[in-house]
Image (cartoon, grey):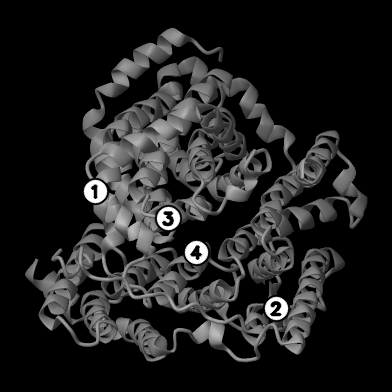
Amino acid sequence: MTEEALGGANAAAKPLQKPRRSASAEMIIPVAGIVFTIYYFSTVWEAPWTAQVSSFFVGCILILCSVAVIVRLALAARRGTMTLDLETLIAPRNFIVKRLALLALTIGYIFVIRWFGFTLTTFIFLMLAMLVLNEGRHPKLIVALSTVLALGGWLLFVVAFEVRFPAGLFETLMRGIL
Amino acid sequence: MEFDPRIFIELFAETIQYWWVIVPSIVLGLVVGAIPGFSAANTIIMLLPLAIVLPIDVGFVAMIAIYCSSRMGAGIPAILVNIPGTAGAAATPLDGYPMTQQGRGQQALAISFTSSVLGGLITTVVALIAMPWLAEVAFYLHSVEMIVVMLFGISLIATIATGDTLKGLTAGFFGLMIGAIGADVVYEMPRGSMGFLELYDGIPLIPALVGLFAISEAFIVIDRDTILTERGRAAVLHSTGWAPTIEGVRETLKRWWHVVWTSIIGLFIGIIPGAGAAIASFVAYQQSKTYSKTPELYGTGHIEGLIAPEAANNGVTSGTLVPLLILGIPGGATAAIMLVVLQYHNVTMGTDLFVNNPKLAYLPFTAMAVTYFLMIFTIPLLARYMSHVTVVRTVYMAPVVIAFTLVGAFVSRDYIFDMYLALAFGVIGYIARRTGYHVAAILIGVILGPLLETYFIRALKMSQGDISVLFSSTLGNILWVCLFLNLAIPIWFERRNGRRKVRSA
């Protein structure tokens, strides 16, 4: 690892920007809990009583807790002590694009791996993700790191541990050579 | 089946001669333990052809060494990057990761390794001596008693949620509800699976673990230069030599009693078939916090909060072998695979094994003792050099964490679907972390939800729907009282301390 990769003794850490607490962001988990519980109940409605009792017990407690959290958050928002935006989730704002790009790359990685295989997909994912997060700086280092890590992963997971990933161009080629 | 110390000493001396199998197995175990998704069970399955071809004693020793060392290896990513290598290490980051952020990663690793080794050694000796009596524990624990054991684990949710009880409970019960997805064990009726056939067997644990801890963490840390706080970064950059490792070992040895009793919790839970290291580590953490004089320090990088889960999950390793050897009932997945190998070699479990082949019967325990003994020598090197991972910049670390932990999500069932599932859990984990819901509480729910439901349905089925069955056994009722006291005592302590503070003010 180079000093750049290790962060370097002189590289200053970026200051943390403390996000404001937002009621609407904190409502996502309890709302998701309520919605999922109602859906879950609909799938056990026809089940025998002994199979229903555990999920109804857990589900009802979840709904009660979630409603209590939502009411508390709504009251806090009404008092003005919390906001009604999604700032808690997206702060710091200058990282929104990077986070969304990383999410898109991750979805792309999982989507493409069945055709390109583990090694090639991992190399492309690591290279693109590192370039995006590092704002295009140190491309040579990133390409070298991505190559080493993808090949290391191939040796460890595919060759040594025989993980049954869909084979791509690289794996097929190497199987022919080896 | 009486314990004969001469056989043990003789066997210990003999087992050391297997060092050539044990050392590479330790290295392999540490590697697979440290990669999320690669459990000891998976590795032994991959090495099954080798374990079958090798002489029974050599194969058995190799399996035991992988099993023990993978437990220790699972703590490494849990402490350094907040990603437990296995579910058994899911309680480790609660205090291990804050220590790393404070720049005490090397010390935390030394504490984790020392507690693992000591916990493993202590419980191996206890299991060896008390094996005939311990084996009976598995006989007495039925569905009703298991429900209470599960509730002990779930009560950790309340412990974690001390900052905001309502949010903690919401997260925990959300996890329990997610854990209830899939077909139930009795009626085989799919519930809440949203039409995905891949969820018929329920939520696979590894994608949930990977998503909640690893993926969400990777998306969160990218706005920092490294995972360390500024103070932590300065501490790491100015720390030199072996001092933090020595300090970590010293701090653990100072708390030897804590290691002893939390590892014994692991041993007892390990004996119960199906309970496993995840429950043991959460129960041990919860008990450690409940009876601590400084419970408010838990979750902030407290040494005892790291010792408890690490000692307990290594205690489980010895525990799972007790019912395997005496009753032929494996205490966990790895023990079940060992049973397959032993049966292939026509080894019959039970009292006969101890009478007819005592050396083979005691071999797993001596192999464990030797493995833990040899692992002592790995502590300084691993603690000192692994801790440097924390200064790697997040722009490089985050993509690596995402790519390689998604591999772990895939490995458990070979489904691409599980990688998407890990990403979905990553999104849930990201939202939860950012909005103050503890991901460990969600994970406890996901782990314990299906187990609790299984025992609940079985108990009700046997009693033909009579809910009073939950209070029908003497042992169960004793456990209910223990659970009640366990929840009430901390509240009583808190109120007493509050009154004292008021008086002293």
Residue identifier under label 4? B209
State the CA–CA distance, disc 4 to disc 2: 20 Å
**Who comes first in sequence, dot 4 or dot 3?**
3
Residue at 38% across, 91% down: A97
Disc 2 residue crowd, few under 14, some 14–19, many 20+, Cα 10 Å: many
- Residue B255: x %, y % from top left: 50, 30
State the CA–CA distance, disc 4 to disc 3: 11 Å
Residue identifier under label 1? B385
Residue at the farthest front position: B505
Q: Quick one: SS at disc 3? A: helix
Chain for numbered disc 1: B
The answer to whether marks 1 and 2 sit on the same chain is no
Disc 4 versus disc 2: nearer the observer = 2
- Residue B366: x %, y % from top left: 39, 24
Chain for numbered disc 3: B
Residue at the farthest top position: B6
| Quadrant placement of the C terminus of chain B | top right
State the CA–CA distance, disc 2 to disc 3: 27 Å
Q: Quick one: SS at disc 2? A: helix
Relative vertical location of residue B123 with respect to residue B31 in this rendering, above or below:
above
State the CA–CA distance, disc 1 to disc 2: 42 Å
**Who comes first in sequence, dot 1 or dot 3?**
3
Q: Specify whether residue B85 is in view.
A: no
Q: Amino acid at mark 2?
A: Pro
Q: Quadrant of residue B443?
A: bottom right
User: In the image shown, does B188 or B62 lie closer to the viewer?
Assistant: B62
Q: Amino acid at mark 4?
A: Leu
Q: Amino acid at mark 3?
A: Ala
